[in-house]
Image (cartoon, rainbow, N blue to C red):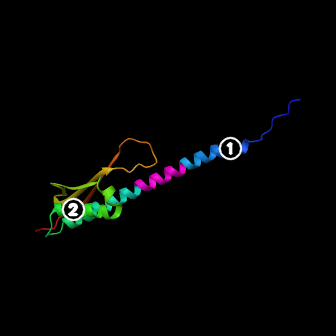
């Protein structure tokens, strides 16, 4: 005589299916947090480099060096080696000269299988007269 089938073992299957979705969601949130952290560090470093390079006794190239140092200090030398901060020439805002520092580099995609994505941020500061 055949025994009627019940829902024995269904909890194990439910746990596996739900845990895979929860793990994927957790890794996605971690990845977004990492990308936002790197973006915020780059924005702050570019702004700091622009302010430093905009001083009357400094050059925009010195500002770019300062931005690279700030990125290396915040993210480490390995990640900073892939990022590049450079001055952009000829920047003006409403006719006033500004120092523009552009930081570019690859996004650190750890958990997502995506292609090479880059991020570019700018930092601006009004240039002091020399």
* The image quarter in which residue 46 lies: bottom left
Report the residue at 19% width, 60% height from top: 99
Residue 31, magenta (yes or no): yes
Q: Residues within 10 Å of mark 1 (few under 14, many from 20)?
A: few
Give the side of residue 96 with respect to residue 6, left or right: left
Residue range (magenta):
25-35
Above or below, 117 against 62 in this view is: above
Q: Residues within 10 Å of mark 2 (few under 14, many from 20)?
A: some
Give the numbered dot on residue 65: 2
Give the side of residue 2 with respect to residue 46, left or right: right
Q: Position of residue 38 (x, y in %)?
A: 37, 57
Report the residue at 21% width, 60% height from top: 64
* The image quarter in which residue 78 lies: bottom left
Q: Position of residue 83 (x, y in %)?
A: 29, 54
Q: Position of residue 97 (x, y in %)?
A: 16, 60
Give the numbered dot on residue 14: 1
Q: Position of residue 42 (x, y in %)?
A: 32, 58
Above or below, 4 against 20 in this view is: above
Residue at the farthest right position: 1
Give the numbered dot on residue 71: none
Q: Secondary structure at mark 1?
A: helix
Q: Quarter of the image for the C terminus: give it.
A: bottom left
* The image quarter in which residue 55 lies: bottom left
Q: Quarter of the image for the N terminus: give it.
A: top right
Mark 1–mark 2 Cα distance, whole angstroms, equals 54 Å
Q: Chief secondary structure of the magenta span? A: helix
Residue 18, magenta (yes or no): no
Count of picture labels: 2
Report the residue at 30% width, 51% height from top: 105
Q: Secondary structure at mark 2?
A: helix
Residue at the farthest left position: 130
Q: Earlier in the sequence, mark 1 or mark 2?
A: 1
């Amino acid at each position: 005589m055949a025994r009627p089938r019940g829902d024995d073992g269904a909890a194990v299957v439910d746990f596996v299916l739900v845990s895979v979705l929860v793990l994927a969601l957790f890794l996605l949130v971690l990845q977004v947090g990492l990308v936002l952290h790197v973006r915020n560090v780059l924005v702050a470093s570019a702004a700091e480099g622009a302010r430093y390079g905009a001083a009357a006794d400094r050059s925009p190239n010195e500002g770019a060096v300062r931005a690279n140092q700030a990125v290396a200090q915040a993210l480490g030398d390995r990640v900073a080696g892939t990022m590049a901060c450079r001055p952009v020439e000829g920047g003006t805002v409403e006719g006033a000269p500004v120092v523009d520092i552009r930081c570019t580099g690859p996004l650190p995609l750890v958990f997502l299988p995506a292609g090479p994505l880059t991020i570019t941020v700018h930092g601006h500061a009004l240039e002091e007269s020399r």
